[in-house]
């Protein structure tokens, strides 16, 4: 086992531990635990919860596809962590919207909640991949699919971090701030792990 692989393996163990901690925190700290006013339907908090739910759902789909195909235990562990962590966070977002008495979806354009607070394209959520790219994860030979997954998920996570960093500058709710901060930390760590995995494949 190379030093890089050992480091990636250790990083995945740490990420899994952090994910458990975030899940426990989600149970203890319920959406109504802070005293902030209930967000309006057109608020940044509501927009973030809706858009990040959609963003996470695509990551879960991609990770679930690759974890059922790969024979690489490190990649399988990382993909499983992404599935479990982001499904749990989707549950948090849904819980917030329900607690706030707001619908799960909106007719407002993606990222309209972040207008003026980020340089992101206001027409799309950052890091989202195309349907064609998702189909390639299912159809390409496994080694090519693994490399494509890592490339796409790095980009996807970078977009998720950018969204979470945007809401951190806008929200005054402790619950939203806590979860957005955990998304930034967790996905940045996973980006580093995936970059190492991708480098290993390019030098093998």
Image (tube, helix red, strand yellow):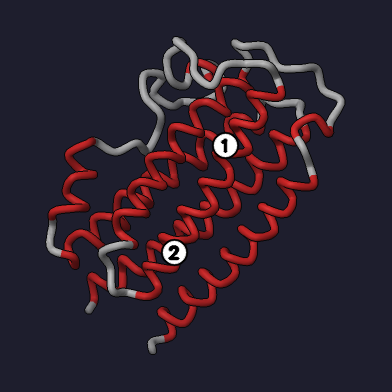
- Foreground pick, 55 / 187: 55
The crowding category of the residue bearing disc 1, from other C-alpha atoms within 10 Å (few below 14, some 14 to 19, many at least 20), is many
Q: Is residue 120 above or below residue 143?
A: above
Residue at horizontal 32%, vertical 74%? Answer: 72
Q: Circle 1 sits on which residue?
A: 164
Could you say which disc has been placed on residue 78 in the image?
2
Taking 166 as reference, is 51 left or right? left
The quarter of the image holding the N terminus is bottom left
Taking 136 as reference, is 169 left or right? right
Residue 59 lies, in percent from the top left, at 40, 45
Q: Secondary structure at mark 2?
A: helix
Taking 116 as reference, is 107 left or right? left
Residue 19 lies, in percent from the top left, at 61, 58
* Cα distance in 3D space between marks 2 and 1: 21 Å
Q: Is residue 68 above or below residue 88?
A: below
Could you say which disc has been placed on residue 147 in the image?
none
């Amino acid at each position: 086992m190379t030093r890089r692989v050992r480091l990636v393996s250790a990083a995945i163990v740490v990420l899994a531990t952090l994910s458990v901690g975030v899940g426990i925190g989600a149970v203890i700290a319920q959406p109504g635990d802070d005293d902030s006013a209930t967000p309006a339907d057109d608020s940044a908090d509501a927009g973030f919860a809706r858009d990040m739910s959609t963003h996470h759902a695509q990551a879960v789909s991609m990770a679930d596809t690759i974890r059922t195909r790969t024979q690489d235990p490190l990649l399988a562990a990382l993909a499983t962590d992404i599935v479990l962590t982001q499904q749990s966070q989707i549950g948090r977002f849904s819980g917030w919207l329900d607690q706030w008495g707001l619908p799960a979806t909106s007719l407002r354009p993606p990222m309209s909640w972040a207008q003026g607070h980020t340089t992101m394209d206001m027409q799309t959520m950052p890091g989202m991949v195309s349907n064609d790219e998702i189909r390639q994860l299912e159809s390409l030979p496994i080694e090519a699919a693994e490399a494509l997954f890592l490339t796409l998920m790095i980009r996807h996570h970078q977009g998720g971090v950018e969204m979470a960093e945007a809401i951190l500058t806008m929200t005054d709710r402790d619950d939203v701030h806590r979860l957005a901060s955990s998304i930034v930390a967790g996905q940045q760590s996973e980006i580093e792990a995936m970059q190492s995995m991708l480098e290993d494949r390019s030098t093998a």
